[in-house]
Image (cartoon, rainbow, N blue to C red):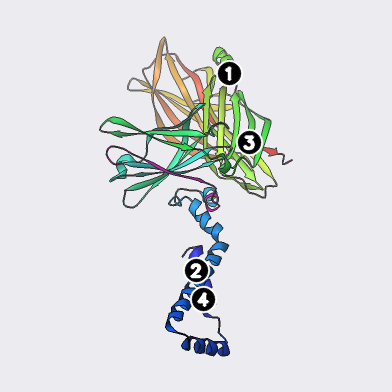
Amino acid sequence: MNDLDRFFEKKRIEMEMINVPEELELKLRSALNNTPPHLKYSKKFKIKWAAIIVAAIILGSNIDTLAFYGKKLVGYEGVMNGTLSQLNELGKGQIIGKSYTFEDGTAVTLDGVMLDENQLLIFYTIRSGNVLEFLNVDNSNISGIAGEYMTESAQGEIDKENNEVKWIASFSTPHFFEKRLKWEFEIEKSGENEKGEISFVLDRNKAMGYTLKKHLNEKVKVDNATIRFQSITASPTTTVVKGKIQNIIELAADQITGERIRPYNLDIKIYANGKEVSIQGSEMTTDIKGMKFSFEYDALPKNLKELQIKLVSFEADYDASESVKLERNEKSQSVEINGQKVEINKVYEKGGETYINITTEENVALSKVNLTADDKDLKLQGTIPGKHEKKILNDKESMITYTRTLRFNGTGEELTLNINSIKYNKMYNKIIDIPMN
């Protein structure tokens, strides 16, 4: 039972509980019995009009509720997160309700959109006899006056009958002057792509803007690079943190000096009023503007009093130029690269191959190595898995190490291990306080 049904049921019960005074009831019965038949119909007609007027009063007092239900996106409960569900309950979306049908009968319906400072969300439904064949559309983009806006992320849910799937897709926010937009997409059928499109007018009055927007100039030094936090923008649907790892000049300089850095993972968390805000996605890109990152989180709470960004860890692959002359004995050797220790435990030959047993911290990998055997360069053929071991450093700290064996095809009298790049994850746990004024 929805809110409107509950309202009418409550009013019905209240009216049934009203007791008519006995004296009034007797007078009404007497008047009706002494009235000619044609007037009785007249009174019934008046009673009907009275009922209509009462209903109009009831509906009039709840007309906002009826309009509110007409603005909601229906059927997306399983796809929306908590924030989007709340915004949908408040009627913040723009209903579109336009469809495109392909030749085979597959129908794509643009149900509605939500727009704010950080993103444009589109809500669409795919219907087909067997939707498993077309779980989603391909090459999805939105075009306007200023060009195209590509899909940044999407999530969907299929129904139990496999006839329908609901999708929510995120696009970058169109420029402020964009109004008439066209959503273009494709489906593949028998090896060929069929194109479809739906045009719609963006209602800027429905746009939700932003709740917090800060330009940042915060830096955290990491090995061979600096993490720069440039901005944080919070909107009703999401919170976005953007920054840069290297600019184009730094990228070029590293290329020349042979000290390149290739990021693998950047772990950034945000905390609002002391509680972690759930992450929704992230990306790192490299182009002519440099090496950039963007992290997307859930919306911030309304009663925001404290906001923090935390750089937890940074994992990257670093260029190296370390050569170690190996000795065939049980005596271990070690080398340190960017503060990461590599222990060479044992070197031995077997079946025309050379084996090198090494130990590092568990998050360290020799990503590019080769072995010089006399005057031959031997490529790494594979790594034989070993074991993890926990080492106690002191009362508060411990370390997990990983021992494995590198296998090279070939042997030689003089052996040199060449380490050309090393990948590792390093913890920083650096907290940045964002001013609220």
- Residue 232 is marked as 3
Which sits earlier in the primary sequence, circle 2 or circle 1? 2
Q: Residue furthest top?
A: 375
Observer able to see residue 263: no
Q: Percent x, y for residue 378?
A: 39, 16
Camera-near label (4 vs 2) is 2
How far is disc 3 from disc 2 in space, using C-alphas?
A: 54 Å
Q: Earlier in the sequence, mark 1 or mark 4?
A: 4
Q: Amino acid at mark 4?
A: Ile
Mark whose residue sits in front, 1 or 3: 3
Disc 2 marks a residue whose amino acid type is Ile
Q: Nearer the viewer, residue 36 or 91?
A: 36
Helix, strand or loop status at disc 3: strand
Residue displayed at 57% across by 22% down: 290
Foreground: disc 1 or disc 4: 4
- Residue under label 1: 248
Q: CA distance from mark 4 to mark 2?
A: 18 Å
